[in-house]
Image (spheres, helix red, strand yellow):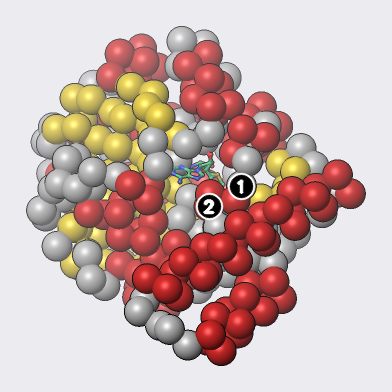
Amino acid sequence: MPPNDRSSASASVTHTVETAIFDAASGGGNDNHGWDELIEQAVRDNVRSNADVDWGRFNSQAYFDHNYGKLRDDDREIIQVVGDFFARATRGKMVGSAIDVGAGTNLYPAMTMLPYSSQLTLLERAHSNRAWLLRELPEPHESWLDFWDEIREGREHYRPISDPFYVLQERARVTRGNVLTLEEDRYDIGTMFFVAESITTRTDEFQRAVRHFVRSLRHGRPFASAFMRNSSGYYVDGVHFPACSIEEKDVRAALAPVAKNVTISVVESNDLRDGYCGMMVATGFKR
Ligand SMILES: C[S@@+](CC[C@H](N)C(=O)[O-])C[C@H]1O[C@@H](n2cnc3c(N)ncnc32)[C@H](O)[C@@H]1O
């Protein structure tokens, strides 16, 4: 953590401790001893809730340059899984409105849903990322062409779209929002890439994010979600952001109450940064 982050880290621990106290109280516990333990645990673990993080400090261009300035092999593999799944799940039909949750500076999840969606919500909590997306849609970076070629290769449903960036700009709505308060039963297809585990250190918030995402879809609708595996957090332009360290079993457990026919694929990846152990992609349908 850079030195100038220390004051915000201690403020975040204070906030988290308050949250822990509130959680303990609303859980019905009136045992002071339990609260003390919770507080000590939160301080020891340096817990950071989603609300503790100043998302306005997310440097969009630095994140884009590092992650999506060129097409990487791990993204290539994720595209294979997601492109094939959506083709099978929709049978090439237009299903309705789509959502990409926590879009950040990543256009390719939305691009995989283009043939199937008449409207695309790009939901983002960070103002910096919403502003970046609004600038990016009319003037996309060249690297997205390589992502599109990879998506389209061998998949007939994408062929009729001759100008994907025009179609994306026409259909996309950049929207301020929070995955933890998403409205239920609203969308017909959805993606959420590297969000649930990369916005908090808290397992309960990771689970809530996964479940709110899936619940935002209508009954039986398909989704794809990507996760960092065993992530210890990440830096964007020197600012530290939290992560919840998860594996396949955690993704499966988070999805179990809300999704059916779930498949989880592990994607090899080790050179994006330190402190993670590959990626995972989950596909399935809302229960
Ligand atoms: C690691 S980035 C992933 C961005 C992008 N989806 C990708 O594939 O690279 C996490 C994203 O989640 C956003 N985010 C943080 N808290 C959120 C929340 N409560 N609801 C929705 N998005 C959130 C951040 O602003 C950031 O864009």
Check mark 1 vs ligand 1: CB closer than 8 Å? yes or no.
yes
Instruction: Name which quarter of the figure residue 33 lies in.
Output: bottom right
Q: Which residue is mark 2?
A: 50
Helix, strand or loop at mark 1: loop
Residue drawn at the location 67% of the way across and 79% of the way down: 40
Residue drawn at the location 66% of the way across and 60% of the way down: 14
Q: Which residue is mark 1?
A: 53
Disc 1 to disc 2, C-alpha distance: 6 Å
How dense is the environment of label 1, judged by Cα within 10 Å: few (below 14), some, or many (20 and up)? some
Which numbered circle lies on residue 104? none
**Circle 2: residue type:** Asn
Query: Is 196 on the left or on the right of 13, as rendered?
Result: left
Check mark 2 vs ligand 1: CB closer than 8 Å? yes or no.
yes
The x and y percentages for residue 261 are: 20, 67
The x and y percentages for residue 153 are: 38, 36
The x and y percentages for residue 146 are: 52, 29
